[in-house]
């Protein structure tokens, strides 16, 4: 599944290659500096802790971490109202980047993120302390009731689409929208919902569900 996700969604740009190279060089320089000292064990321990903390929970839950692309955030911006209060949830919010970008543009909105990976959630939670209209919870989205949100956003994986469809069909409130990035919900489970599709780019479509 991970393989499918990566080939479908990662478009590697020249800048990304430079980015990866710079980080690799930086890490190698740090490694050279502390090689042969006790600090190397701490350094490797910290790297392993971060990698395991970010990626293990995602693998357990069949959903790898991958951030929403800027064009999708632009589309979300066009969908949200400027003239009234609303509640928006990102189901599996990663570092919370979608929430923080939207929260700046929509001060009347309340933005909530749930994230199962403790490191991602902790980073988002710390950042949210400085942003009054964002809150991030370290919790499993399957335990979060969705009925009191006006906008439900999810960028997950095909593996959990059926479970997500059942949850949304059960909990989506009248006049609310569920915006699903890339992975269409199975028709068999979402037949009680209306569907609109917005093609954002060649490889990204937003599926927008509302109650019939
Ligand atoms: C594809 S990433 C999207 C991240 C974020 N929404 C964004 O667009 O930048 C999916 C995220 O969902 C999280 N996740 C997976 N299963 C979850 C679950 N059951 N409950 C909460 N978060 C979950 C993963 O850890 C990962 O950070």
Image (cartoon, rainbow, N blue to C red):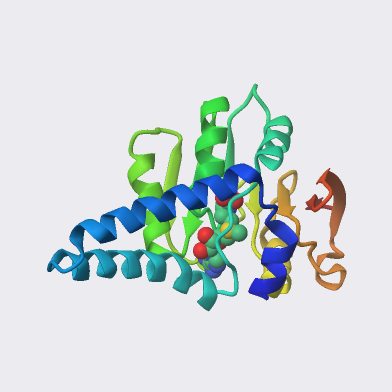
Percent x, y for residue 58?
Answer: 52, 69
| Residue at (65% x, 57% y) in the render | 155
**Horizontal placement of 165 versus 97: left or right?**
right
Relative height, residue 60 to residue 98 (above, below)? below
Q: How many marks?
A: 0
| Residue at (57% x, 66% y) in the render | 64
Res. 38 in view? yes
**Horizontal placement of 206 versus 187: left or right?**
left
Query: Which one is nearer the viewer's eye here, 161 or 54?
Result: 54
Q: Quadrant of ligand 1?
A: bottom right
Q: Quadrant of the N terminus?
A: bottom right
**Horizontal placement of 45 versus 106: left or right?**
left
Answer with the quarter of the image where residue 117 lies. bottom left
Query: Which one is nearer the viewer's eye here, 55 or 11?
Result: 11
Query: Which one is nearer the viewer's eye here, 212 or 196?
Result: 196
Res. 95 in view? no
| Residue at (52% x, 33% y) in the render | 103
Query: Which one is nearer the viewer's eye here, 67 or 165?
Result: 67
| Residue at (58% x, 57% y) in the render | 66
Percent x, y for residue 83?
Answer: 65, 21
Percent x, y for residue 79?
Answer: 73, 34
Percent x, y for residue 160?
Answer: 67, 72
**Horizontal placement of 25 versus 66: left or right?**
left
């Amino acid at each position: 599944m991970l393989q499918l996700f990566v080939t479908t969604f990662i478009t590697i740009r020249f800048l990304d290659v430079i980015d990866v190279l710079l980080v690799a060089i930086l890490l190698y320089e740090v490694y050279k500096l502390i090689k042969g000292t006790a600090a190397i064990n701490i350094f490797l321990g910290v790297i392993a802790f971060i990698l395991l903390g970010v990626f293990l929970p995602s693998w357990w839950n069949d959903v790898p971490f991958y951030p929403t692309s800027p064009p999708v955030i632009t589309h979300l911006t066009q969908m949200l109202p400027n003239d009234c209060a609303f509640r928006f949830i990102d189901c599996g919010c990663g570092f919370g980047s979608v929430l923080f970008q939207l929260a700046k543009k929509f001060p009347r909105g309340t933005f909530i993120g749930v994230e199962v990976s403790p490191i991602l959630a902790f980073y988002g939670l710390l950042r949210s302390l400085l942003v009054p209209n964002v809150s991030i919870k370290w919790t499993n989205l399957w335990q979060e009731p969705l009925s009191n949100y006006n906008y439900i956003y999810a960028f997950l994986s095909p593996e959990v689409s059926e479970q997500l469809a059942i949850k949304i069909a059960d909990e989506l409130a009248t006049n609310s929208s569920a915006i699903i990035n890339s992975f269409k919900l199975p028709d068999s489970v979402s037949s009680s919902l209306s569907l609109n599709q917005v093609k954002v780019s060649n490889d990204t479509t937003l599926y927008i569900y509302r109650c019939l």
